Image (cartoon, helix red, strand yellow):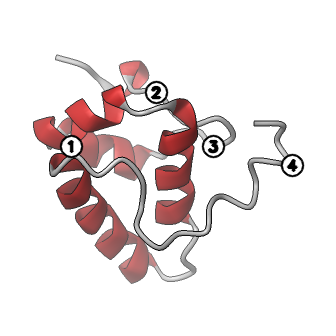
Amino acid sequence: MADQRTLAGGTVHDLPDDLAAALLGAPAARSTWEDITPLARNEWICWVTSPRKAETRTKRIAWGLESLSEGTRRPCCWPGCPHRLKGGG
Protein backbone atom coordinates (compact mmCIF):
# COMPACT_ATOMS: atom_id res chain seq x y z
CA MET A 1 0.00 0.00 0.00
CA ALA A 2 1.21 3.49 -0.83
CA ASP A 3 2.11 5.87 1.95
CA GLN A 4 2.36 9.64 2.02
CA ARG A 5 5.95 9.57 0.82
CA THR A 6 4.84 7.89 -2.42
CA LEU A 7 1.98 10.29 -3.18
CA ALA A 8 3.08 12.97 -5.60
CA GLY A 9 2.54 16.67 -5.03
CA GLY A 10 2.02 19.41 -7.55
CA THR A 11 4.24 21.56 -9.71
CA VAL A 12 4.55 24.29 -7.07
CA HIS A 13 2.81 22.97 -3.96
CA ASP A 14 3.83 20.02 -1.82
CA LEU A 15 1.09 17.63 -0.76
CA PRO A 16 -0.15 18.70 2.70
CA ASP A 17 -0.45 16.05 5.41
CA ASP A 18 -4.23 16.31 5.81
CA LEU A 19 -4.92 15.87 2.10
CA ALA A 20 -2.40 13.03 1.86
CA ALA A 21 -4.04 11.20 4.77
CA ALA A 22 -7.46 11.66 3.19
CA LEU A 23 -6.24 10.31 -0.16
CA LEU A 24 -4.66 7.30 1.52
CA GLY A 25 -8.05 6.47 3.04
CA ALA A 26 -9.91 6.77 -0.26
CA PRO A 27 -8.61 4.29 -2.87
CA ALA A 28 -10.79 5.54 -5.75
CA ALA A 29 -9.73 9.15 -5.16
CA ARG A 30 -6.09 8.08 -4.83
CA SER A 31 -6.32 6.24 -8.15
CA THR A 32 -7.42 9.42 -9.94
CA TRP A 33 -4.79 11.42 -8.03
CA GLU A 34 -2.06 9.10 -9.28
CA ASP A 35 -3.39 9.36 -12.85
CA ILE A 36 -3.64 13.15 -13.16
CA THR A 37 -0.81 15.45 -14.19
CA PRO A 38 1.41 17.30 -11.71
CA LEU A 39 -0.27 20.54 -12.82
CA ALA A 40 -3.72 19.08 -12.07
CA ARG A 41 -2.50 17.88 -8.64
CA ASN A 42 -1.17 21.38 -8.04
CA GLU A 43 -4.62 22.84 -8.76
CA TRP A 44 -6.26 20.48 -6.24
CA ILE A 45 -3.64 21.26 -3.57
CA CYS A 46 -3.93 25.02 -4.05
CA TRP A 47 -7.73 24.82 -4.05
CA VAL A 48 -7.73 22.81 -0.79
CA THR A 49 -5.16 24.99 0.98
CA SER A 50 -6.36 28.43 -0.14
CA PRO A 51 -9.29 29.05 2.27
CA ARG A 52 -8.66 30.98 5.48
CA LYS A 53 -11.01 28.90 7.62
CA ALA A 54 -10.14 25.35 8.68
CA GLU A 55 -13.82 24.46 8.30
CA THR A 56 -13.74 25.38 4.60
CA ARG A 57 -10.53 23.43 4.07
CA THR A 58 -12.12 20.35 5.67
CA LYS A 59 -15.16 20.70 3.39
CA ARG A 60 -12.94 21.07 0.35
CA ILE A 61 -11.00 17.92 1.21
CA ALA A 62 -14.26 15.96 1.55
CA TRP A 63 -15.67 17.37 -1.70
CA GLY A 64 -12.34 16.81 -3.42
CA LEU A 65 -12.21 13.16 -2.39
CA GLU A 66 -15.72 12.63 -3.68
CA SER A 67 -14.92 14.38 -6.97
CA LEU A 68 -11.63 12.56 -7.45
CA SER A 69 -13.40 9.27 -6.67
CA GLU A 70 -15.77 10.05 -9.54
CA GLY A 71 -12.84 10.73 -11.87
CA THR A 72 -12.92 14.54 -11.80
CA ARG A 73 -9.46 15.70 -12.78
CA ARG A 74 -9.58 19.36 -11.70
CA PRO A 75 -11.54 21.36 -9.12
CA CYS A 76 -14.67 22.83 -10.65
CA CYS A 77 -14.97 26.58 -11.08
CA TRP A 78 -11.40 27.23 -9.92
CA PRO A 79 -9.54 29.88 -11.93
CA GLY A 80 -6.28 28.07 -11.31
CA CYS A 81 -3.39 28.30 -8.94
CA PRO A 82 -2.11 31.87 -8.80
CA HIS A 83 1.29 30.57 -7.62
CA ARG A 84 2.24 28.36 -10.55
CA LEU A 85 3.58 31.13 -12.76
CA LYS A 86 5.59 32.55 -9.88
CA GLY A 87 7.03 29.11 -9.20
CA GLY A 88 8.00 28.52 -12.79
CA GLY A 89 5.57 25.60 -13.21
Closer to viewer: mark 4 or mark 2: 4
Which amino acid is tagged 2? Ala
Q: Which residue is tagged 2?
A: 8
Closer to viewer: mark 1 or mark 3: 1
Which amino acid is tagged 4? Lys
Residue under the point 35% across and 69% down = 60
Inter-mark Cα distance, 2 to 3: 10 Å
Which amino acid is tagged 1? Ala
Vertical order, 56 against 48 (above or below): below
Vertical order, 55 against 39 (above or below): below
Q: Which residue is tagged 3?
A: 13
Residue under the point 18% across and 59% down = 66
Q: Which residue is tagged 1?
A: 29
Vertical order, 40 against 1 (above or below): below
Mark 1 is surrounded, within 10 Å at the Cα level, by few (under 14), some (14 to 19) or many (20 or more) other residues, namely many
Sequence-first disc among 4 and 2: 2
> Badges 2 and 1: C-beta atoms under 8 Å apart?
no
